[in-house]
Amino acid sequence: MSQSRWFLPVVLAGGLLFGFGLAVSTMTHPEVVLAFLTATDLGLVFVMGGGSVVAAVAFWGLPRLRDDAPLTGDAYSRRLKPFDRNVVIGGSIFGVGWGISGICPGAAYASLGIGNWPILYGIGGMFIGAYLQGWYRSQRTKTPVRTPADD
Amino acid sequence: MVLLVGMSLLEAAFPNGIAQYALGGLLIGAGVVLIYGMTGIAAGASTFLESTLSYVSAQDRFQQYRPSRDWRMVFTLGIVGGAAVYAVAIQGGIWVTEVQPWRLFAGGILVGIGTRVGKGCTSGHGICGIGSVSRTSIVGVVVFVAVAAVTANLVALAGVTP
């Protein structure tokens, strides 16, 4: 990929907006997420709703305006991931973790930004979890006999 | 009468109003759109965990993210920085959670496993995936919100606060 010198600055600017938005939404507070999950304040539907509506307009409209993205020359493709049982298994494990803690990756990074230092326990846990599944799955792909065909 | 009942239901569902939630959501969406519009990349937050592990581990699972690990690092530093700007300019100081560390740690481990097995998190599936009308992401979001709601209620029922 031939990279424009504006590539990383644009990614940084997008990250700044993303993180600032997460802080504005108060989703950086695990308490607010837990209030949503226990139905005492349903406001978080507007965070995911607002974000996905804005994204949907761009994902729908940009490919109709231009063929490719200015900084990379890559086509505007839809972000579609194949469905299999892992989406349900992984989503369930994620759900138990989210319900116990009230934290998810993006909100956890932003939570660090607002000075919430105990979130480091959560981010550390996420790295341990990501490492455990990566280690386990890397082992499995080295022994193809035991690898089920649908993974 | 109907109006009054409706008003009190809204009051119960949204005791803190909706302005900050909606505005925050629009800004998060704006960040996603800026990156997508300029680069064609629909960025999620959780791949950063694995792409960053590629700096320290030779496992295939992490090395596959090597090409994107630098910009994912920049994206995450941006997220931390954007929230820090909010803390300085609007919040006026730091904010610290009262949720117990063991909950953050244990939940974090499961979030780290689940988001990578399930191919996405609240931003990848929840914002980009739903924004793309991806059926995979819609199923992912329905599953994790439902499971999380049951879990959070069970934890609360068990008397764990906060």
Image (cartoon, coloured by chain):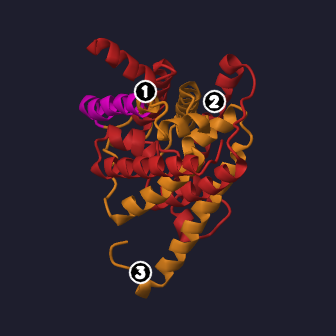
Amino acid type of the residue tagged 3 in the rendering: Thr
Q: Which residues are magenta?
A: A48-67
Q: Badge 2: few (under 14), some or many (20 or more) residues near its Cα, within 10 Å?
A: many
Q: Which mark is residue B83?
A: 2
Report the predominant secondary structure element of the magenta stretch: helix
CB under 8 Å between callouts 1 and 3? Answer: no
The residue depicted at 55 percent of the width and 73 percent of the height is: A136
Left-right relation of B15 to A80: right
Specify the amino acid type for callout 1.
Ala
Q: Which residue is mark 3?
A: A147
Q: Amino acid at mark 2?
A: Ala
Q: Quadrant of the N terminus of chain B?
A: top left
Chain of the residue where label 1 is placed in the rendered structure: B
Q: Circle 2 — which element?
A: helix
Residue at mark 2: chain? B
Q: Which residue is more in the foreground, B155 or B75?
A: B155
- Residue A61 forms part of the magenta stretch: yes
Query: Mark 2 and 3 residues: CB-CB less than 8 Å, in contact?
Result: no
Q: Which chain is rendered red in the image? A: B
Residue B87 in percent (x, y) is at: 69, 24
Q: Is residue B23 above or below residue B142?
A: above
User: Element under label 1?
Assistant: helix
Distance between the alpha carbons at the discs numbered 2 and 3: 42 Å
